[in-house]
Image (spheres, helix red, strand yellow):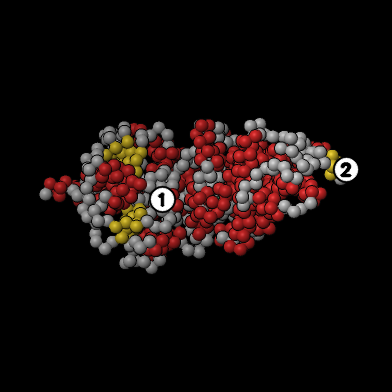
Amino acid sequence: MVNSLQSPAQANYWLVQGRILFLALYALGSACFFYIVARRLMPLLRAQRDSRFDRPLHRLGRVLQFWLGQWRHPRYRVAGIIHLLIFAGFIILATRAFTVLALGVSENFAMPGLSGNAGHIYGVIAEYASTVVFLCMVVAATRRLVFKPARYAVPARYGKGHPADAIFLLALIAILMAADSLFEASKAAALVQQGQAAEVMPVLSLGWMFTRALAATSLPVLQNLHLGAYLVHGLTFFFLLCYRPFGIQFHVETSLFTVFFAKLDGGTLKPVRWDVPDEKLDQVKFFGVKTFEDFTWKHMLDFYSCADCGRCSDNCPANAAGRPLSPRFLTIKARDYAFQHYPMFGKVGNGKALVGNLYSEDEIWSCTTCGACEQECPLLVEYIDKIVDLRRGLVDDGNVPQSLQKPLKALESRGNPYGKLEKKRADWAAAKDFQQSCPVRLVKGKAADTLYFVDSITAYDDRIQAIGRATARILHHLGEDFGILGAAERDSGHDVRRFGEETLFQALRDHNTQAIQASGVRRIVTSDPHAYNALKHDYKDVPPVEHVSQVIAREVKFGRIKFHPAEKGKVYTYHDPCYLGRHNQIYDDPRSVLDAIPGLKRVEMKRSRDRSFCCGGGGLMLFYEPKEDERIGVKRVRMAAEAGANVIVTACPFCMVNMEDAIKVAGLEGKMTAIDLAELADQQIVKETQLAA
Ligand code: SF4
Ligand code: SF4
């Protein structure tokens, strides 16, 4: 194709030849960018180690799914679609941007493989891509300025939002797209005027509109537009490149790495130090995160990658209840800290304690570790490990909330948070009439096939003991050879660990591991999702564990459990416990049990399955009373009422405590009840005698 206009490489800009000007611009722009990124990487080089290089193929698959495939974005329909379009546009336009930049140095440059017809086809696609990106910028700016989705708002306690910054960035991208199209369109308009073959501008694209608008423009003006658009494109490109690492747009560079290095296994917790085995922890100077540099490099990378979309906080129950915690700002504050203390020039780091300066203690203790934030984040940013690390740091300094001190002491001395005697741990099963119908034996010394791991709340709480008896009756009904550890069992330590008391957790874990190994059982069943999660992920060298809902679901499927019809007039809804659902993906088994009860009417709450809303937190959270506007559990029972349910079924003793409490606080007594899945199943099971009759 004949080029009727002088190319940017040949033209003179203020007496400097374009080729030289653009070479200098690219060299300067690239040097600035690499310098900025090198400074941004400085805290990562001073950070704690992290182990993120295992299972590279699996990680690659997740990059394809979550980064390239933008898997989680459409969970928020409008914003998700806009982001998908922008991302796809950027991927398509990466080649074009490089080609356009190269034209400033070499006027006839064409990407290998993109000359001839392939180049024409790519040109059409790229022209539409830049039009779509341009329109997305307009829509995104309108959303920010006019519709203002609530999740973008910045509550006063977290400082000020930066809407002007967001609009400025959107405008820069829009300018980049427009300049690119104008550069092509001015050339096409000139060729058409001269009766020469021009690049096809696809209908309704920006380039097409510019070409039509410029149809009658004189050649000298077209020449100036052509060169001016090129210069604006080059300057905007490098300005954007160097400006992005100063704000949320840095995620464009870092997100791929954040997704690649993201945590692979739900329900797990990072060790105190990745490079120190448990038996050498006594050699570690201190536990947890106290200063910024105590975070791992991956956690610092998370801070840079957050796009400030607010989805995490939008789903955080602590945030919804008005607790002083917003995961989004946990990240944004840390990112701002990194920017402030690792500036572009001069001294770096200040080594000040984070809690008390950047974060408040209440903020750190407010998290229920429900995982909703991590489930929602499109970039797989992690929270629980960071929060637990900050708690470890507080515990290391002896900074434990008053209300938790007594239960933690009791756990240390008696193995349960209530301070009750070990020998009373099996009392829930001791009643004569219960033992006659459902003999529960101790496995100590007499090997059984299955261990029912009861855990503290089910063993000692008067109300929750009923769940223990229901579970035992189901196992008995199934003819399982099962037993319990009784006084030899200690608290699983699940929530002790998540409250940052690693040493105590390890003592509890080691005690239980020895007792389980000594019992000779081949499998473990528990009715407590927290115990389930601990035995599955926090313990090593113990037999495989199942939650009782899995056992019931399997036996229903094989026809070994049959149910009486459900009570009429009741509408049930299932509340997913966080440590069964989100952390371990057990969503279907409990629902299949409910659906197997003839005539049972079940409705779903708006927030269910992986978007379930925490009950308020289990384990030690029951002993902690944070400041909040409304209890998390109260919000949850209101959601059940909104769904039209009058019975909340759950499968976790802690959810049961929170739900029954919340029903009273919400004034729904008499209108709403809560029941555990094991209790309901036990109530509805058709016993052998009934089957025979
Ligand atoms: S784990 Fe749950 S409570 Fe904690 S920050 Fe995330 S969403 Fe909020
Ligand atoms: S952490 Fe993830 S979900 Fe939360 S604001 Fe940042 S990008 Fe959005």
Q: Residues within 10 Å of mark 2 (few under 14, many from 20)?
A: few
Disc on res. 609: 1
Let me know if residue 212 appears in the view: yes
Give the residue type that dot 2 points to: Leu
SS under mark 2: loop
Q: Mark 1, mark 2: which one is toward the viewer?
A: 2
Work out which residue is located at the far right of the displayed protein and give it. 15
- Is 426 left, or right, of 220 in this rendering? left
Mark 1 to mark 2 CA distance (whole Å): 66 Å
Give the residue type that dot 1 points to: Arg
Let me know if residue 237 appears in the view: no
Q: Position of residue 374 (x, y in %)?
A: 51, 47
SS under mark 1: helix
- Of residues 546 and 307, the one nearer the viewer is 307
Q: Residue at x 88, y 43 (%)?
A: 15
Q: Which residue is mark 2?
A: 15
- Of residues 90 and 635, the one nearer the viewer is 90
